[in-house]
Image (cartoon, grey):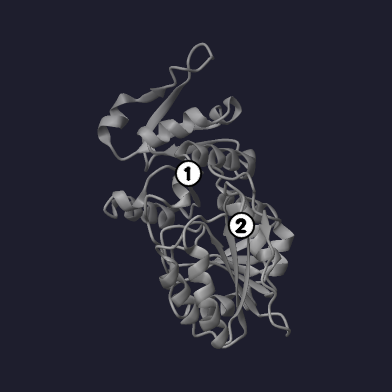
Amino acid sequence: MQRPGNSRAPGPPALVSVILPVHNAEEWLDECLKSVLQQDFEGSMELSVFDDASKDKSMTIIERWKGRLEGAGIAVVIGGHDSPCPRGVGYSKNQAVAQSSGSYLCFLDSDDVMMPQRVRLQHQAAEQHPTSVFTSHGPTVIMPTWFCSRAWFSHVGLFDEGGQGVPEDLLFFYEHLRKGGGVVRVDQSLLLYRYHLHAATHSVLETTIWTHRVRFLEERALPYWAAFTIWNAGKQGRRLYRSLTAASQRKVVAFCDVDENKIKKGFYCHEDAQERPKPRVPILHFRTAQPPFVICVKLDLTGGEFEDNLRSLQLREGQDFLHFS
C-alpha cells in the first residue's frame, strides 16, 4: 500500500532536490543523511526520500533526521509504500523525482556519502550545460554521481521500472544520449561509493549489461562504419566479435594486439559461425591495423602500456577510438 508523502512547508520550490531512494538501508543512512546536512551549497535544497518497502529501521532513522535537516533549512519530503515486495530502484527514483520540487536533481544512493562541495560544484556546472548530466571523478560515468536539470530529466523520460535485474541507470543513460544529451565531469572526487554484497547493482547480471552495451554499439556507431578493427585478440575481443550480429561481424576486418603469440597465430576462426567456410579474421600488430577501432582492453590492467601506445598512435595518425570494455 502506498504511504502518503509528507507535504513540505509552504514556500517556493527548491533550487536543488536530492533524490534518495531507500530500501533496507539502516546500516548506512546516518552517514548518508549527515552528508546531505553538511553540503556547503548556499542555494535552497530539499531532500526527497522514497522508501521502497523497507522492513528494517530505515524510516525511523529518516524521521529522526528530518527535524535536523529542516532546522538547517533543507526541506524534507518523504514518500513510500508498504507492499510485501520492493518495486525496484527505477520505480523509487521516479517516485522521489515526482514528489520533489527542485529545478535540479541530485541523485544519491542511500549507502553512499557525498563530499560537502558536491551539490555546489555540480550545480555550477549544470548552469553552464543545460542538456548534460554531470558526474564526478571516479570509476564510472553511469550513476551514482548524476546531477541534471529537471527539464532535461523530463525530456529524456523516466527510469525503467522493470525492477530487480534491470540496469535502469544504464538504460536511462542510453536514452539520454539518443536525445542528444552530453556528459560533463566535475573533475573532483565528490562522493564516496560504498561497495558491499547487498548493493542493488549485484542483482544485475554481467551478461545483461554486456548485451545492452553491444546492442547500443550496433545502434549508435557501427551503422556509420563500413569496416572496423577490434583492438584485443584475447578473450574480451573475441567475445565482442561473437556477440555481434552477422552483419556487424562481416564489418570486422581484423583484430589487433601487442601480444606476439596471438599475432603469430595469424587469424581468429569463429568456430560457431553458420557460414561456410567459417570466417577467419586476421590478427595484426596494432601499428599495422587500420582504424576505426573498437577497443576491448581494460585500461587499468595494462600498467599504462596500452594507454601509452594508444596515445602515440593518436598523435601520429590523428585517429579517433571507441573504447568498449
The local crowd at label 2, few if under 14, some if 14 to 19, many if 20 or more residues have their Cα within 10 Å, is many
Q: Who comes first in sequence, dot 1 or dot 2? A: 2
Q: Is residue 302 left or right of residue 34?
A: left
Identity of the residue drawn at 58% across and 78% down: 123
* Horizontal and vertical percent position of residue 22: 53, 60
Looking at the image, residue 274 lies above or below residue 260: above
**In-front residue for pair 56/238:** 56
Q: Residue 263: x, y in percent?
A: 31, 31
Q: Secondary structure at mark 1?
A: helix
- Check disc 1 and give the amino acid type: Ser
Asked if the residue under mark 2 is in contact with the one under mark 1, i.e. CB atoms within 8 Å, the reply is no
The residue at which mark 1 appears reads as 203
Image quadrant of residue 9? Answer: bottom right
* Residue on which the image places disc 2: 92
Q: Residue at x 50, y 75 (%)?
A: 64
Residue type of the residue flagged with mark 2:
Ser
- Considering every residue shown, the one lying at the far top of the view is 276
Q: Residue shown at 26%/53% (left/top)?
A: 303
C-alpha gap between disc 1 and disc 2: 16 Å
Q: Quadrant of residue 107?
A: bottom right
> In the image, is residue 63 above or below residue 40?
above
Whether residue 162 is visible: yes
- Please state if 322 lies on the left or on the right of 257 as rendered: right
Percent of width and height locating residue 130 = 67, 71
**Quadrant, the C terminus:** top left
From the viewer's perspective, is residue 323 above or below residue 263?
A: below
Q: Residues within 10 Å of mark 1 (few under 14, many from 20)?
A: some
Label 2 residue SS: helix
